[in-house]
Amino acid sequence: MNVAVVVQRYGLDINGGAELHARQIAEHLHPGTRVRVLTTCARDYVTWRNELPPGETSVNGVPVERYPVSHERTPERFAALSERTFHRRHSIADELRWLDSEGPVSPALLRRLATSGTEFDFVLLFSLRYHHAYHGSRALPDRAILVPTAEREPSIGVTLLQPVLRGVRAIMYNSPEERRLLQSIARNETVPGTVVGVGVQVADHPDPARFRQKYSVDTPYVLYVGRIDENKGCGALFDDFRAYARSNAGAPQLLLIGRAVMDIPRHPLIRHLGFVSDEDKFDALAGADVLLMPSPFESLSIVVLEAWALGRPVLVNARCEVLLGQCLRSNGGLFYDDTAEFCAALDALLGDPGMAAALGRAGRTYCDAEYSWPVVEQKYRDMFSRLQGEGPAPAGMEPLPGWWAQRRRTLPPAAAVVDAVATGPVLDREVHFS
């Protein structure tokens, strides 16, 4: 079987959530399946600047083809088109301009897909909101398997994405909450789909003492791992943690791992370690009292799963329905909605090691059952077999409206479309609070 993985950026040093997800799927499917990655020459998701050479290369044994991006993103144009599309009545033409400004626009990549003929049995396209996924899905709807990696944010309500969600061959969702969100918007329940996410693989023998010695950490600590960004909830995390430290003389350190794209406050208990190796990350996770995940928008948090795989409890932002749902389904952590709840939940986790350990064990059990690589790989292979067994694909993608119809500004604001969908966790299994 030949499978293409199509993603906006790709490489060992590109560790964004969707991009890392795509690389891990490609590498784990590669044994037994001929996988080929099609991507751009961009390394930076903000500019889409061509930084990597075009042509064919190999990453961890998987062949990779890179194609140039035709133009960089213009932040001002993207912001203006996002404002119109997300918050005002607008047209399909406005949405197409927004999608072009979102990028990455790579005509050569799209030509490669459109002219691939029968080379690929299936094409895995990451992620829904990007230019290549939209046009790639429309080019090969009978073989397109979409991996949306969608969060509850305004772009998911863009009208032109709905025919893609109804017209692809199958969809691999990250969570029950993502599936409900996209099915509610697109009414695409008849499209084959399954909740699969991504597998988790952590170090066999992490060593917290090694981490402590290397980074001179000699006190208890809580941990944040990821891009240090206002959009990831880090500004609110700093406020919440400082509030906790003011009222608790024995507060732990807050250690931060990841690239900072915002200012980090000066505080005696807040320490930024920067970008670290996987070995250091797993050592740090294994020794943390709690992993903190303040992001209000996640389609699936790999680092939360990694913390659970290492038996550590988590404290997550309850405003992210995916994280809240994961905690309730796993019994692997606590959650908070405001500063007072953050302080109370963190105090409970730090003050009751037995409860924290029990939450960590429950998280590990859940992670092993739902997110081990054998489970994830089998879900993909089962979908491939199912689609092959169904025979020819159904009717193709709904066509775009004509020139005049595309320019009628009758579409609702995308944010309003998303706001109309029910919120909250999806509890597809019994939840025990004891």
Image (cartoon, rainbow, N blue to C red):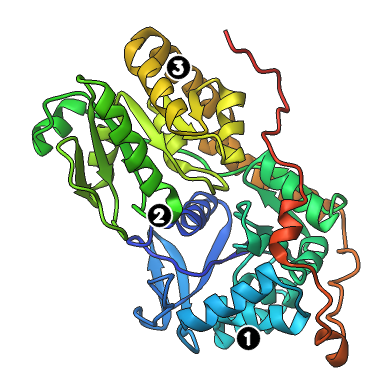
Q: Tell me, yes or no, if residue 104 can be seen here.
A: no
Q: Nearer the viewer, residue 389 or 393?
A: 393
Which residue has dot 3 on it?
A: 361
- Check residue 230 in the rendering and tell me which mark sits there, or answer none: 2
Determine the secondary structure under disc 2: helix
Which residue has dot 1 on it?
A: 111
Q: Nearer the viewer, residue 111 or 229?
A: 229
Q: Is residue 348 left or right of residue 246?
A: right
- Residue at the location (84% across, 51% down)? 389
Q: How far across and down, in percent of the image, does residue 213 sit?
A: 9, 32
Question: Residue 294 occupies which quadrant of the picture?
Answer: top left
- Residue at the location (52% across, 67% down)? 37
Question: Mark 1 or mark 2, which has the lower sequence index?
Answer: 1
Label 1 to label 2: alpha-carbon separation: 37 Å
Tell which tag, 1 or 2, sits nearer the viewer.
2
Q: How far across and down, in percent of the image, does residue 402 sit?
A: 87, 88
Label 2 to label 3: alpha-carbon separation: 31 Å
Q: How far across and down, in percent of the image, does residue 203 sit?
A: 32, 34
Q: Nearer the viewer, residue 188 or 55?
A: 188
* 142 lies above or below 250: below
- Amino acid residing under circle 3: Arg
